Amino acid sequence: MSVTYIDAIREAQATLLREDPRVFLYGQDIGRFGGAFKATKGLLEEFPGRVFDSPISEDAMIGLAVGSAIEGLRPIVEMQFADFSSVAFNQIVNQAATHYYRTGIPVPITVRLPSGGTAGSGPFHSQSMEGIYAQYPGLIVLTPASVSDAYHMLIDAVAFDDPVIYCEHKFLYRWLKAESINGDRLPIGQARIVRTGKHATVVAYSAMVHEAVRAADSLLKDGWEIEVVDLRSVKPLDIDTVLASVARTGRLLAVGEAFPWGGVTAEVVSRVADEGFHLLDAPPLRHNSRDTPVPYHPKLWAAHRPTPESICQSLRKLLTF
Amino acid sequence: MSVTYIDAIREAQATLLREDPRVFLYGQDIGRFGGAFKATKGLLEEFPGRVFDSPISEDAMIGLAVGSAIEGLRPIVEMQFADFSSVAFNQIVNQAATHYYRTGIPVPITVRLPSGGTAGSGPFHSQSMEGIYAQYPGLIVLTPASVSDAYHMLIDAVAFDDPVIYCEHKFLYRWLKAESINGDRLPIGQARIVRTGKHATVVAYSAMVHEAVRAADSLLKDGWEIEVVDLRSVKPLDIDTVLASVARTGRLLAVGEAFPWGGVTAEVVSRVADEGFHLLDAPPLRHNSRDTPVPYHPKLWAAHRPTPESICQSLRKLLTF
Amino acid sequence: MEMQKPTLDGATNREFLRSVFHSMLRARILENKLSSLYKAGKIVGGVYLGRGQEAVSATLGTSLVQGRDVFAPLIRDQAGRTAFGEPLIDCTRTYLGSAQGPMRGRDGNIHRGRPDLGVPAMISHLGSQVSLVAGMLFAKRIKGTLDGTVGATCIGDGASSTGAFHEGLNLAAVEKLPMVVVIANNQFAYSTPNQRQFACADLVEKARGYGIGGLAVDGTDLLACASVITEAVRRARQGGGPQLVVAHLLRLSGHGEHDDASYVPDEIRKGHYGRDCLEVAMRQLVEHHHATVDEIYAWQDEVAEEVQRAVAQAQQEPGPDPYREVWSALSHTFSHPTAQ
Amino acid sequence: MEMQKPTLDGATNREFLRSVFHSMLRARILENKLSSLYKAGKIVGGVYLGRGQEAVSATLGTSLVQGRDVFAPLIRDQAGRTAFGEPLIDCTRTYLGSAQGPMRGRDGNIHRGRPDLGVPAMISHLGSQVSLVAGMLFAKRIKGTLDGTVGATCIGDGASSTGAFHEGLNLAAVEKLPMVVVIANNQFAYSTPNQRQFACADLVEKARGYGIGGLAVDGTDLLACASVITEAVRRARQGGGPQLVVAHLLRLSGHGEHDDASYVPDEIRKGHYGRDCLEVAMRQLVEHHHATVDEIYAWQDEVAEEVQRAVAQAQQEPGPDPYREVWSALSHTFSHPTAQ
Ligand SMILES: Cc1ncc(C[n+]2csc(CCOP(=O)(O)OP(=O)(O)O)c2C)c(N)n1
Ligand SMILES: Cc1ncc(C[n+]2csc(CCOP(=O)(O)OP(=O)(O)O)c2C)c(N)n1
Ligand SMILES: [Mg+2]
Ligand SMILES: [Mg+2]
């Protein structure tokens, strides 16, 4: 038996609905249809009255979720694509994110963002917005990279009293499989070393963890041993694990699929540069997508995002400094 | 005669309306009322048919601007407060910012964002969003810190064929005065060294330039000579000038008023850590606001943002490393 | 006087009208005080008043029951807050920066709320509260506690142009939630007149397009408000789905106290909606023998006293202490490292 | 056959109807081809078809004049694009990833546009094009070139729930712009039926609430479309301000070609709106002696040929070259350093 990343997301929601009467699901086409990606398939039938199709109103969807959370419920909102959360931006960053600080009353909502690029999806169905939301105080931003994390981190997300942006990578949905959803179940706030090495540390998250591992694989034949750290959550960001790794390797490359200005890789590198300056034997590097919208054509797309090949290139630069 | 920062913004708009028939102004209450901050006072009377009051529809305001730009005009849109651009977020980052890359047709719109904190303004009238917009490809993000820059950079903004986010700081509006709007008129993309020094470099922008200069002033009595670099634009970001300064001082502190995760200071520090690693004699530091919404009460607000005192503290840490 | 909250179907009910009027009075006297405090430089931040909107707002607040209903006030709802049960001290503490106010100095003035008591704390972004109230009602339905409950919010003519208003109202209509949305059409949004804001003859014409109930009312006329707004609340409470009430009136102050509203033309000021709803209400109460002039004067004195006390108390209380402030926007504390 | 664009007031005009029908036919045959290419794995990205919406879309496109008017197509407007003047090769190049397509591989399929020719390139976010079209008209007014011009866009029933739709339409109404917004109510938004999307009886009832003209039409009936949509365009062109047209129909394919639309109940499929507008149109043309069956068959063959050619040509053309791609989202090149 094998479980995919999207199975895990579906299972987590089923578990949550089963075990917590406060949980309900809200989103476009998530009811009978089971969602654009089938992440809620069968859940309406299994949990009648707990899964709701929403109008095409992202702003109101989040407003509704915050109101429900004030009333003690735990909504999980599915955005059809992360990119469409731009229309709900105000409700997320100003309504949900500020509510606890302003009123003392937390709003436990979970917003699922189908994120990241896939071939042929183009500028508006490919975005990675974790680095946007993480800039706002009051949000927890999760970026699971494994089947087990996809499951457990969604369970954890709903358990938080605070609003959570749960970035699930569309490329991993069916591509990523595991024997089961079991795993080490690290707590949120702890990064995972997915591969040990001694010559350099690659910090990555979400789909890029897998590209980084492939890059590491291919450098092995040249004798380079690359450590790969999966951040798991970008806010909170487990800088301690990153620093410990850099302490071992002396070299850092931060890899992200998002646009190159600012974002997760800048936060990682600038924190390591501050807190781990003396650990570094070479300038810390970043590798992000290019500074254009995500292109539609697969040939352009493949050259826009970091790939195992381009990560190798960055790593060779880092290793030979 | 003295000119304030907001006078400069008004004058720039008057000049643009006078000299370029393609320019028009669009925003809430900017007509007869002259705008919430009086940045357009008298302009409707002077330029009838060129200044329009909009409905409270930020999304549509930007949509209208992009449509007008396609038709060859050069709209300047005033958001009443930067914070309200969250409602126009989609039109800015997905419609305006992607248009040239997708179609080859540039959309020269300028969006004026009254930004930054002032005492008693609270969580929704104080935000600094430059680090959010700069993450998106296709936008130019300007953050003038002087009266002369306020004028010339708005003129330059409108001259660009690309969409410009012009972040004007509300605290500087009437507080900052100059003899005239004349100045060195640097091109966009070039930072300015506003104060030379040899012991450390502070990189700042917008209102924080002035707080940094005050901090530098007060450290002078202890013999510390601090160089202050005003970025002027955060995208493009003039890393060369920053690197040249760090080459002289060996130490870097990046100061910003925005929230601490990611943003301008992370971009600056991580780029210096990469491109100027060998220039650094100490870990590069950042100093931002705290990671909560901007509080309303002046006492909390003053402790939330960087101040000359807190910048001094960061600098002392940097200098004594 | 202790005002008792009258029964709900009391549009024509003496106690209901006296109660509404009393809240109007309390709001007006409190706001007059806030205005002088503002002019004396005693207030941090802006002061946004509900003068001219009291009949609408207080009627709405009085039609609702705290502990059961939801009332999401907006900028000009001091009277509705008072009527719904907000103690004056919550207001003075917030405006005067006491750390004991409901927002503890973290947010200010009109943003105050007590979401746990059914009063959401508004964010500035106009229109945002509509879907939030819908969400509170939606949750009550899921929990099985919705029956007989109403959620209400006020909003301005200007805010009707926001996408958030549209999405929220449509969603409420689709879910047939017991919701009352009152548009206080005070003819201006800041300086912007209705004709630059919308093109329909009356905003109430939007109701049909949402498939919800719609009622228009003269917002300067207490008796009209009492009959129309209670009717809207009654319909919502009885399962009639969302109700849109459009109240016509004029803002009798500036947008905020910094604004002299010189853009309001004289003919509007002197027109029908320029009349003071408080004076109208007082005349109506007296004419219908619901109260005597002497009684009202006595209320005025009592309220003035009460306002004085609330101001004095808040002024004595210290502001927030940045050194003891918990600088966290999350309720959760991560044992493991956190960003920043 | 070269189809001539007929005069505008041609609702009952033979040439107009023949032209609309011809565009419907071209769109249908082209889309059938796209569908098979999709199933054969020859297309990158999704394929979203306008089957069932051709009468509405082609009538709108035919009522407009390229070079003067603005037409902002949405997902299901292949017929309208064709009618407005888009060459088939623009379509096939985009779907087949030719670098010579209007989006040069940077954006795909239904997002293609030629803004300089009055055809904005839609972004995915539903509702966003309404204010953009308003802006194009607004600019033409400022430039003094608005007279006699119309801007039109199609939108779905689902998109009517977006804040962007509301803000854009309201703004157009306030500015009294010559705009036609056609809501193609195909009863579903992806899988979501009307009753989960809005609560009014007919979306056309929204028109009054915006203070604009409103017309409803049977979107499966070419003659009805021809009369109602041209009337809306005429009103807008003659200064009547924005016009909302609500066309009732059924999507005759899945949301995209990946979707079997099994959520559409049989009674709807078999109901009135389940009929194929192309068949209806063909019958109408023949009945009214606007065309003979033989003529139509001949057109079909011609178009099939034309589609074949456009596909073949696009298939021969290379895709974009990432090594020669200009990786810049700005038109400006800074001489001084730039970010990244
Ligand atoms: C989305 C948004 N845009 C702009 C503003 C700034 N603003 C605050 S109040 C106001 C006018 C509101 O007018 P209206 O809704 O009619 O309410 P009124 O003040 O007349 O009671 C504006 C433009 C805001 N708060 N939110
Ligand atoms: C703001 C936004 N939210 C969600 C989507 C995803 N989406 C694309 S098409 C669609 C359904 C649109 O339905 P409708 O407007 O009725 O048009 P139709 O497909 O029926 O022609 C959805 C939800 C989107 N494109 N934009
Ligand atoms: Mg108003
Ligand atoms: Mg539809």
Image (spheres, coloured by chain):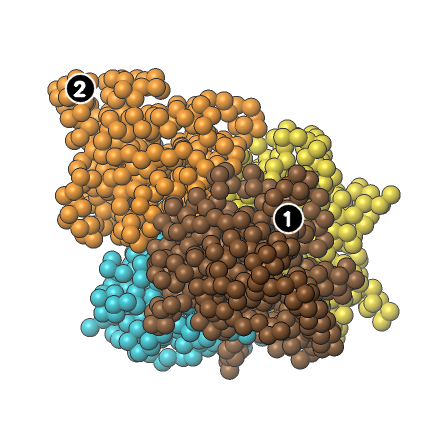
Chain colours: A cyan, B yellow, C brown, D orange
Q: Identify which amino acid the numbered label 2 is placed on.
A: His
Q: Identify which amino acid the numbered label 1 is placed on.
A: Arg
Q: Report the disc number at residue D35.
A: none
The answer to whether residue C192 is seen in the rendering is no
Residue identified by numbered label 1? C275
Name the mark nearer the viewer: 2 or 1: 1
D176 is higher (above) or lower (below) than A207: above
Residue located 45% across and 66% down the image: C8
Seen from the viewer's position, the closer of residues B73 and C266 is C266
Q: Report the disc number at residue D288.
A: 2
Seen from the viewer's position, the closer of residues B71 and D322 is B71
- Quadrant in which residue D210 is drawn: top left
A188 is higher (above) or lower (below) than A258: below
C327 is higher (above) or lower (below) than B245: below
Q: Position of residue D193 (x, y in %)?
A: 27, 51
Mark 2 is surrounded, within 10 Å at the Cα level, by few (under 14), some (14 to 19) or many (20 or more) other residues, namely few
- Quadrant in which residue C174 is drawn: bottom left
The answer to whether residue C320 is seen in the rendering is yes
